[in-house]
């Protein structure tokens, strides 16, 4: 029996117009009425999903949200942190040096701000064009932070062909040191090596005492692979990448065809 449903946002719960369909809302409501935990699992910070949590009524003291691709678990209502793993300032400096070497811009992100930096002159960051409007950008020099400051992730956002070309230039040491995930064709997310969505999902399962076989995870992109592989019911959207579809146990409809609702009704209700 499914006791927890973890749902990605972009390309999964949200349709092409970045909206949640009535069918998806109703299926989620019925799952919750059945006692199933429904948890948004996203690369965004909680500030970037607050409106979605409110729209889905996932804002009680018994609702949880997994953000930063598994690096942070919070209680939705209070934003109390239950689990957190991120980068140190030293990590961010190392990421900055390597990305600068290959010509990629970066934006370090913590729970409060997205930080700008000196970008390559020929390749500025595009992150402000795709980030949720609720995120706040700061030009505060992140080199000046205390060594203990927690940065939840670092992103590099630029045209797809440039991003792919420059990622191929990363050193083997760098690729072994960090977890590099593309959550969109133009967006690279750089996380601590052990952090991915399955890391966050394992943590919330530990907290709630839920077994992997009692979990459904629904997603569409590379950063969803780990949680889909972890869950007993790993579901790929009809619009998912080939790799995600080959990893998933089940395939549902696309995000423009109420794929989340179809999966919930078929396997959880």
Image (tube, helix red, strand yellow):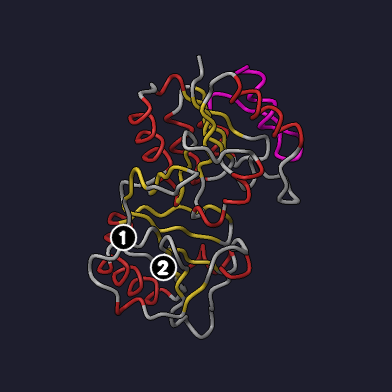
How many numbered marks are there? Answer: 2
The quarter of the image holding the C terminus is: top right
Q: What residue lies at 37% left-to-right and 55% top-to-bottom?
A: 191
SS for callout 2: strand
| Viewer-nearest residue: 25 or 266 | 25
Q: Which residue is mark 2?
A: 108
SS for callout 1: loop
Label 2 neighbourhood size at 10 Å, few (<14), some (14-19), many (20+)? many
Q: Is residue 102 left or right of residue 92?
A: right
- x, y percentage for residue 234? 52, 28
State the residue lying farthest toward the top: 1
**Where are the magenta residues, as a range?**
248-269
Q: Give the image quarter of residue 177.
A: bottom left
User: Is residue 60 located in the magenta-colored stretch of the structure?
Assistant: no
Label 1 neighbourhood size at 10 Å, few (<14), some (14-19), many (20+)? many
User: Is residue 257 located in the magenta-colored stretch of the structure?
Assistant: yes
State the residue lying farthest toward the bottom: 121
Q: Give the image quarter of residue 265.
A: top right
Cα separation between marks 1 and 2: 9 Å
Disc 1 and disc 2 in contact, CB within 8 angstroms: yes
- x, y percentage for residue 21? 75, 39
| Residue 87: mark | 1
| Viewer-nearest residue: 11 or 214 | 214
Q: What residue lies at 58% left-to-right and 65% top-to-bottom?
A: 161
Q: Is residue 176 left or right of residue 257?
A: left
State the residue lying farthest toward the left: 147
| Viewer-nearest residue: 95 or 135 | 135
The correct choice, above or below, for 168 with respect to 63 in the image is below
The correct choice, above or below, for 63 with respect to 161 in the image is above
Q: What residue lies at 61% left-to-right and 22% top-to-bottom?
A: 33
- x, y percentage for residue 108? 41, 67
Q: What residue lies at 70% left-to-right and 33% top-to-bottom?
A: 24
């Amino acid at each position: 029996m499914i006791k927890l449903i973890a749902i990605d946002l972009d390309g999964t719960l949200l349709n092409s117009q970045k909206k949640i369909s009535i069918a998806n809302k109703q299926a989620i409501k019925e799952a919750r009425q059945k006692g199933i935990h429904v948890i948004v699992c996203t690369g965004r910070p909680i500030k970037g999903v607050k409106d979605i949590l409110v729209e889905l009524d996932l804002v009680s003291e018994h609702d949880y949200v997994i953000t930063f691709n598994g690096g942070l678990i919070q209680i939705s209502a209070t934003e109390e942190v239950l689990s957190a793993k991120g980068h140190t300032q030293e990590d961010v400096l190392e990421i900055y040096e390597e990305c600068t070497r290959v010509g990629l811009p970066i934006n370090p992100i913590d729970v409060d701000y997205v930080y700008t930096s000196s970008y390559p002159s020929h390749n500025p960051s595009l992150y402000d064009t795709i980030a949720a409007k609720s995120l706040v950008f700061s030009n505060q020099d992140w080199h000046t932070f205390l060594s203990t400051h927690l940065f939840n992730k670092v992103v590099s956002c630029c045209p797809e062909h440039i991003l792919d070309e420059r990622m191929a230039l990363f050193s083997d040491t760098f690729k072994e040191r960090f977890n590099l995930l593309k959550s969109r064709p133009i967006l690279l997310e750089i996380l601590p090596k052990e952090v991915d969505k399955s890391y966050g999902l394992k943590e919330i399962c530990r907290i709630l005492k839920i077994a992997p076989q009692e979990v459904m995870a629904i997603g569409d992109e590379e950063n969803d692979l780990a949680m889909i592989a972890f869950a007993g019911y790993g579901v790929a959207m009809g619009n998912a990448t080939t790799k995600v579809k080959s990893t998933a146990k089940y395939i549902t409809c696309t995000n423009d065809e109420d794929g989340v609702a179809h999966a919930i009704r078929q396997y959880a209700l």
